[in-house]
Image (spheres, grey):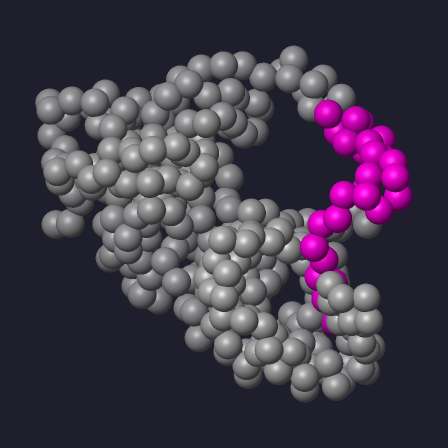
């Protein structure tokens, strides 16, 4: 299995499928399923295990019987491929309009196969977490203990510092991918990442990682981050590729850095600020705005008070002007 590698293409395909379900796009839900007689579907109920082409024909009606979604927030998503086989693992936080206060954590594993050059789902397994202590009467903590021990050992290579963290995200990417098709969209995402990496590194920043169709980067100086954000929005606006728009979020503060990543509440807050931004917006935290001051030559709109998921209270954010 040495050829296993992360797959941005499959991540985009999986997100299209998850976006199609709550939005009742029946044809798209079915078309992303395999035509193979070996297609299998495992649901959360005890008798929900089906196989065969009938799954493809009935899957849209199956999800159509689900109440309207109040929200479906992605908590975790990853995808990998190896030759003509791939898989994606997702966790979503879900609630329904009939009782928005009741929240469910739903896990999905999707296995893909290449059919006529297109990735399609050959196996879907959905589950709702159930505590081991209730199921088996045991904590079953062996894996968790090993992971924690590995993380503790790795902490020796961590260092603390100060950084300005920037997240970017393509608005309505699932719909654009649906129109373009997976192959073209994957190529466009690769080109998009190359452009952002070039701008970020030319501005003295570090392209930390891609996140589906989004990115995370870090800068030693907040002014450099804001200038890079403006350059990125301008480059996307002037691109001769498909019409895409970005939302950008930036926050500054103490972080924990490893060789290849950054961690801490500053990182989380930067991501939430990006998620709160509208299309073509660059949203900047109050901390970052204060640090750049009024001599940077950058212009900001009046502050807005917003709620950020996972953080208490209201938070001041500023919209950085960039349009020419």
In percent of width and height, residue 197 lies at 41, 41
Residue located at (75% from left, 86% from top): 54
Tell me the quarter of the picture where residue 51 sits.
bottom right
Magenta-drawn segment: 122-148
In the displayed structure, would residue 311 be above or below residue 214? above
In the displayed structure, would residue 145 be above or below residue 134? above
Q: Nearer the viewer, residue 16 or 177?
A: 16
In percent of width and height, residue 276 lies at 33, 46
Residue located at (68% from left, 84% from top): 58
Residue located at (76% from left, 43% from top): 131
In percent of width and height, residue 70 lies at 46, 62
Residue located at (72% from left, 17% from top): 153
Q: Is residue 251 visible?
A: yes
* Residue 144 lies in the magenta stretch: yes
| Horizontal arrangement in the rendering, residue 110 relative to residue 219 (left or right) | right
| Horizontal arrangement in the rendering, residue 111 relative to residue 312 (left or right) | right
* Residue 52 lies in the magenta stretch: no
In percent of width and height, residue 64 lies at 57, 78
In the displayed structure, would residue 8 be above or below residue 320? below
Q: Nearer the viewer, residue 113 or 128?
A: 128
Number of numbered discs on residues: 0
Q: Is residue 109 visible?
A: no
Q: Nearer the viewer, residue 70 or 49?
A: 70
| Horizontal arrangement in the rendering, residue 258 relative to residue 40 (left or right) | left
Q: Nearer the viewer, residue 61 or 26?
A: 61
In the displayed structure, would residue 249 be above or below residue 145? below
Tell me the quarter of the picture where residue 170 sits.
bottom left
């Amino acid at each position: 299995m040495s050829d296993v590698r992360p797959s941005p293409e499959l991540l985009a395909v999986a997100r299209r499928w998850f976006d199609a379900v709550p939005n009742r796009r029946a044809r798209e839900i079915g078309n992303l399923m395999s035509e193979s007689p070996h297609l299998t579907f495992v649901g959360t109920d005890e008798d929900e295990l089906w196989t065969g082409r009938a799954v493809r024909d009935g899957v849209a009606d199956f999800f159509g019987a689900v109440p309207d979604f109040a929200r479906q927030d992605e908590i975790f998503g990853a995808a990998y491929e190896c030759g003509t086989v791939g898989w994606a693992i997702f966790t979503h936080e879900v609630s329904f309009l009939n009782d928005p206060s009741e929240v469910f954590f739903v896990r999905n594993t999707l296995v893909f196969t290449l059919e006529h050059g297109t990735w399609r789902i050959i196996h879907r397994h959905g589950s709702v977490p159930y505590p081991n202590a209730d199921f088996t009467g045991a904590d079953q903590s062996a894996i968790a203990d090993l992971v924690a021990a590995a993380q503790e050992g790795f902490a020796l290579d961590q260092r603390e510092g100060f950084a300005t963290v920037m997240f970017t995200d393509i608005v309505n990417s699932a719909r654009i991918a649906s129109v373009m098709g997976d192959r073209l969209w994957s190529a466009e995402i690769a080109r998009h990442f190359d452009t952002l990496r070039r701008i970020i590194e030319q501005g003295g920043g570090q392209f930390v990682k891609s996140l589906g169709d989004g990115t995370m980067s870090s800068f030693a100086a907040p002014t450099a981050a804001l200038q890079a954000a403006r350059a990125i929005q301008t480059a996307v606006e002037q691109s001769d590729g498909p019409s895409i728009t970005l939302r950008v979020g930036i926050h500054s503060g103490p972080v924990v850095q490893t060789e290849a990543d950054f961690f801490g509440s500053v990182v989380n807050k930067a991501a939430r600020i990006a998620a709160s931004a509208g299309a073509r917006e660059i949203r900047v935290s109050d901390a970052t705005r204060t640090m750049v001051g009024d001599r940077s030559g950058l212009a900001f709109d009046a502050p807005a008070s917003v709620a950020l998921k996972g953080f208490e209270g209201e938070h001041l954010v500023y919209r950085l002007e960039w349009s020419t």
